[in-house]
Amino acid sequence: MARRTTGGSGGGSGPGRARAAQTGAGVKAARRPAVRLPPLEPYEGCGLEPDGDYDGLEFREADFAGQDGGGARFMDCALTGCALDEARLRHARVLDSVLTGIRGVGTDLSESTLRDVELVDARLGGTQLHGSVLERVLIRGGKIDYLNLRTARLRDVVFQGCVLVEPDFGGARLERVEFVDCTLKGADLTAATLTDVDLRGAASLEIARGVDRLAGAVISPVQLMDLAPVLAAEMGIRVEG
């Protein structure tokens, strides 16, 4: 099983307490995954299987386009450079794993569980994660277009250095979520619930819908000025010269 450490708010000193202090007293820091994979065996199968059980495996440059891995479990795995176009992974469980350079359009991960996962330099479009649970997940680098996270639950999730084009958080619950040096374009927060969500580090913040759901989030003064027209429109305020 992968060993991992996470920052916390308990006693003592260390990176966890230092990071919590850096985020400020008004917002709790997300606990990041620190996945240390055991020695892995190369995957020698010919494809994914529904309800498959994959433990301690390395998937490298595998083409899973159009395959059905619904209900599969990935534990202590590394997926590198894999193609997931139209792959069906509904109800999948991805645990203690690292996904690097994966790519795909229309990947279905709806109602899945991602826990202690690092997603690095992904190139994805139209990924379905609605109704999913993400806990201690780091999404670093890459670009994800039209990410569907409607009604999902995100706890201790960090988006870092990535580009999110029109992500849909409609009806989702976000707790201890951080956006660091990332770009959000046309985000939809309709009916979302935010708790300890830190948006101050976002390089660009554009909210298309649901700006009224920002209660529970922290933004910077500059971001407040950028959002002023949207906030004024939401409150019915006319701004004229």
Image: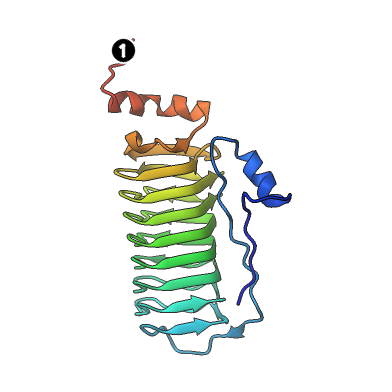
Q: Badge 1 local density, few (<14 within 10 Å), some, or many (20+)?
A: few
Image point 72% across, 50% down: which residue? 12
Q: Which residue ends up furthest to the right in the rendered image?
A: 13
Q: Is residue 81 above or below residue 20?
A: below
Query: Which sits in the foreground, 235 or 17?
Result: 17
Hey, what amino acid is under mark 1?
Glu
Residue 44 x, y percent position in the rendering: 52, 89
**Quadrant of residue 49 within the rendered picture:** bottom left
User: Which quadrant: the C terminus?
Assistant: top left
Q: Position of residue 227 (x, y in %)?
A: 41, 29
Which residue: 44% across, 43% down?
195
The residue drawn where x is 40% and y is 73% is 92
Return the residue found at the far top.
241
Q: Is residue 238 left or right of residue 22?
A: left
Query: Residue 223, percent across and down?
Result: 48, 30
Please, which residue is most extreme toward the left here? Answer: 236
Quadrant location of residue 104? bottom left
The colour mode here is rainbow
Give the total number of marks visible in the rendering: 1
Q: Quadrant of the N terminus?
A: bottom right
Residue at image position (37%, 42%) is: 186
Q: Nearer the viewer, residue 6 or 122?
A: 6
Residue 71 drawn at (x, y percent): 37, 77
Q: Secondary structure at mark 1?
A: loop
Q: Is residue 3 left or right of residue 175?
A: right
Please determine whether, in this image, residue 178 is positioned above or below residue 98: above
Residue at the disc numbered 1: 240
